[in-house]
Amino acid sequence: DPKIIQKPKYLVAVTGSEKILICEQYLGHNAMYWYRQSAKKPLEFMFSYSYQKLMDNQTASSRFQPQSSKKNHLDLQITALKPDDSATYFCASSQNPDSSQNTLYFGAGTRLSVL
Amino acid sequence: AQSVTQPDARVTVSEGASLQLRCKYSYSGTPYLFWYVQYPRQGLQLLLKYYSGDPVVQGVNGFEAEFIKSNSSFHLRKASVHWSDSAVYFCAVRGGSNNRIFFGDGTQLVVKP
């Protein structure tokens, strides 16, 4: 059974709309992340959260907003969607955000297409 | 700043042949190094990791990697590849104040029957 659940698997949106990508992890981890994978940049770090607090943010645009309602949830809200936002968005988690030794575990991704 | 270079975007080998996927990293401190594999339409899965000790680390499915500090390299190897090994392989380094993990651009491995 998948331990990191991302919903939906596929998402089609129109330019200018808003979407929320869902991520839940059942590994008991304390840190969660979002990565983006597109043809232009194969795997790009976006955000990291630790104990529901923002730890690191590499995304320049404020259109991307992570939301953590519970420790094991980290959703990604994207507003004013653009075609360039088309990519696969991966959620990941790790046990202890303070340790370099921690391994990232990935979900299967949400493939977003913006028309 | 940390960075990872995978110089080969695509590698094609015949089934049963040996394999080496190259990875070079840049990091001034003690690197924590990883290899991940991504099968089509799936998330990344950990193959192996290196923190310290024996520079040759064993991973799943017969993969291994060798950390060579003098060369800043962490190449992935397998003695005999199988068609099911066809996938994209990512090398990664973790470190720095935020413990962020940096991925290389990936190497697409194609195993010919």
Image (cartoon, coloured by chain):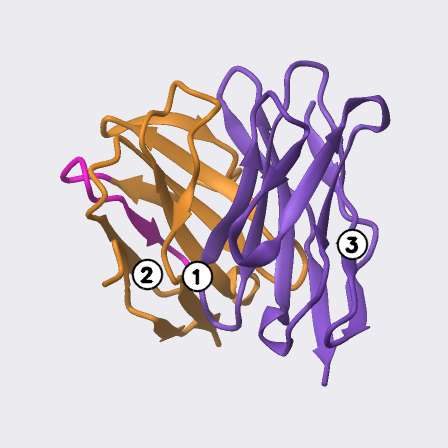
Residues behind callouts 3 and 1 on a single chain: no
Q: What distance separates the C-alpha of mark 2 from that of mark 3?
A: 43 Å
Give the numbered dot on residue B20. Answer: 3
Q: Secondary structure at mark 2?
A: loop
**Does the segment drawn in magenta span residue A77?**
yes
- Quadrant of res A38: bottom right
> Which colour represents chain A?
orange
Could you say which quadrant of the image residue A98 lies in? top left
Mark 2 vs 3: CB contact within 8 A: no
Residue A42 at least partly seen: no
Residue at the location (80% across, 72% down)? B12
Give the label on residue A81, or none: 1
Could you say where residue B3 lies in the image, as x and y percent from the top left?
A: 71, 33
Q: Which chain is purple?
A: B
Q: Which mark is residue A18?
A: 2
Which chain is indicated by disc 2? Answer: A
For mark 1, name the chain: A
